Image (cartoon, helix red, strand yellow):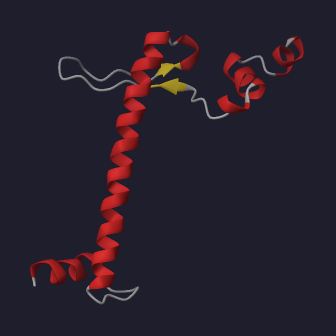
Amino acid sequence: MKGLAMLFPNPIARLRKAHYALEDLPDTVTFPTHPARESEDPLPLVDATVDDIAFAIVAMEEESSRAYRRGSALKRLYQMAREAGAAGVDPAVKAALKRSVG
């Protein structure tokens, strides 16, 4: 491991290089927003505690869920527009509205 430390002095870079499953580790972590406090700046991963990582996982799962729902909604809009007879250059929202509202 001494060789990796010389090549990659940053501990996060060493982890990324040493473990293929950690290649996508972020440099910073963020946390879920809480109504009782102002949003916090991202925390450098190298300073994050185990609890910080747990809260960051919650935030990432929430973000992933929102992205999945947005993608599903876009897919449904596309399907509705196609079912309404829209072609590639037709406005999708207008076509979907025609199909939905009549």
Q: Where on the picture, by quarter, is residue 51?
A: top left
- Left or right of 90? Residue 14 is right
State the image coordinates of residue 65 (x, y, percent, origin top left). 36, 43
State the image coordinates of residue 6 (x, y, percent, origin top left). 86, 15
- Left or right of 20? Residue 84 is left
Q: How many marks?
A: 0
Residue situated in front as seen by the camera: 100 or 46:
100
- Left or right of 85? Residue 46 is right
State the image coordinates of residue 97 (x, y, percent, origin top left). 17, 78
Residue situated in front as seen by the camera: 10 or 2:
2
**Residue drawn at 87 percent across, 11 percent down:** 2
**Residue drawn at 40 percent across, 42 percent down:** 64
Residue situated in front as seen by the camera: 39 or 72:
72
Q: Where on the picture, by quarter, is residue 74?
A: bottom left
- Left or right of 20? Residue 96 is left
Q: Quadrant of the C terminus?
A: bottom left
State the image coordinates of residue 61 (x, y, percent, origin top left). 40, 35
**Residue drawn at 34 percent across, 59 percent down:** 72
Q: Is residue 79 above or below residue 39?
A: below
Q: Where on the picture, by quarter, is residue 16?
A: top right
**Residue drawn at 38 percent across, 27 percent down:** 58
Q: Quadrant of the N terminus?
A: top right
Q: Residue furthest right?
A: 3
